[in-house]
Amino acid sequence: MKTNLNKYLALVICSVLLAVSVSSCKKDNYYKDGGLAKANFNGSILQYLQSNPKFDTIAQIVKLAGMEDILSKEDITFFAPTDEVIRRTIGLVNSNIPYVSGGLNQSLFELNKDTIKTLDEIPQATWRKYLMRYVLKGKYLLKDFPQLDFDLRPQYPGGYYYGYNGDLDAIGVVYNSVINKNTSNNTTTTIRYAGYRQLCIASIVDPSNPSNFYNVSAPVATSDIQASNGVVHVLAVYDAAYTYYNGADKLMRASEILMDDFGLYPDFFQEVILNR
């Protein structure tokens, strides 16, 4: 079954409009804190993806990659990217829509190569190779991963895990700080490791220099969704960690930084271009 990418990418316009409307609060609830997600799902990981509109395209890619049995029958842990990651990675030509310009199609267009119109134009082997980076054999909850501190890597390095196809992943739990502001004397106090805990995953493309991953680590928005055959950790699309005090005793978001490309590294992008 072919997916009409032009029709599919048109959904980006709706998502951008929603981002500036009241409904963006609902999106925040899913993508940022995951508060609306259920901890248990009565079905397989594949059925979870198929039941959730945020994963319509990911479910199609699972089929194109020939990985339906893996996600429905085997005991695995899946770090699930959302459809927005696919939209942004593939992108639009000469788009002025935020976050979807400069993707694969823009680069293909500038190189005088055919742009991607349907998802099945990308070979099955390519989809399979990079989707498997998100899959670990066995079931891993957040509590099963070691602590990761980007500022104190020698003490808290996280851990290294082999993905389903043998690629090396770096995974760890970031213990965030709590920042308290005293309005009476205009001072702040930081309590280290007292805040929320957040999983992060990255692909190690050069095992001889694994520290490279820290620049492209993708955080998890919702962790520990338990299906019948494993665990799903939903990856965040945005990182709202960059914050500041706006002078009105209110913590404000300075910027929202887009996270990983599909495949957790730009080599998916590069491989598709080289094979067009």
Image (cartoon, rainbow, N blue to C red):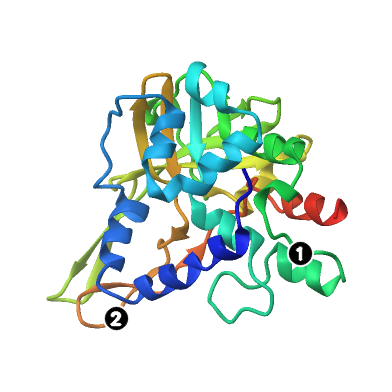
**Looking at this view, is 90 or 212 the one in front?**
90
Left or right, 96 with respect to 125, comes to left
Report x, y in % for residue 233: 43, 37
Q: Is residue 229 above or below residue 185?
A: above
Q: Residues within 10 Å of mark 1 (few under 14, many from 20)?
A: many
Question: For the view shown, which residue lies furthest in the left direction?
Answer: 184
Q: Residues within 10 Å of mark 2 (few under 14, many from 20)?
A: few
Nearer to us: label 1 or label 2? 1
Report how many numbered discs are placed on residues in the image. 2
**Looking at this view, is 180 or 172 the one in front?**
172
Pointer 1 or 2: first along the chain: 1
Q: Amino acid at mark 2?
A: Asn
Report x, y in % for residue 228: 37, 19
Residue at (86% x, 70% y) in the render: 111
Pick the quarter of the image with the N terminus. top right
Residue 201 visible, this orientation: no
Q: Amino acid at mark 1?
A: Thr
Q: Is residue 218 above or below residue 185?
A: above
Left or right, 172 with respect to 133, comes to left
Q: Are marks 1 and 2 in contact (CB under 8 Å)?
A: no
Residue 137 visible, this orientation: yes
Q: Would you identify the image quadrant in which residue 194 lies?
A: top left
Left or right, 79 with respect to 126, comes to left
**Looking at this view, is 231 or 106 the one in front?**
106
The residue that label 1 is drawn on is 115
The residue that label 2 is drawn on is 246
Q: Is residue 132 above or below residue 34?
A: above
Q: Is residue 72 above or below residue 49?
A: above
Report x, y in % for residue 159: 56, 30
Residue at (35% x, 55% y) in the render: 32
Q: Would you identify the image quadrant in which residue 113 lies?
A: bottom right
* Label 1 secondary element: loop
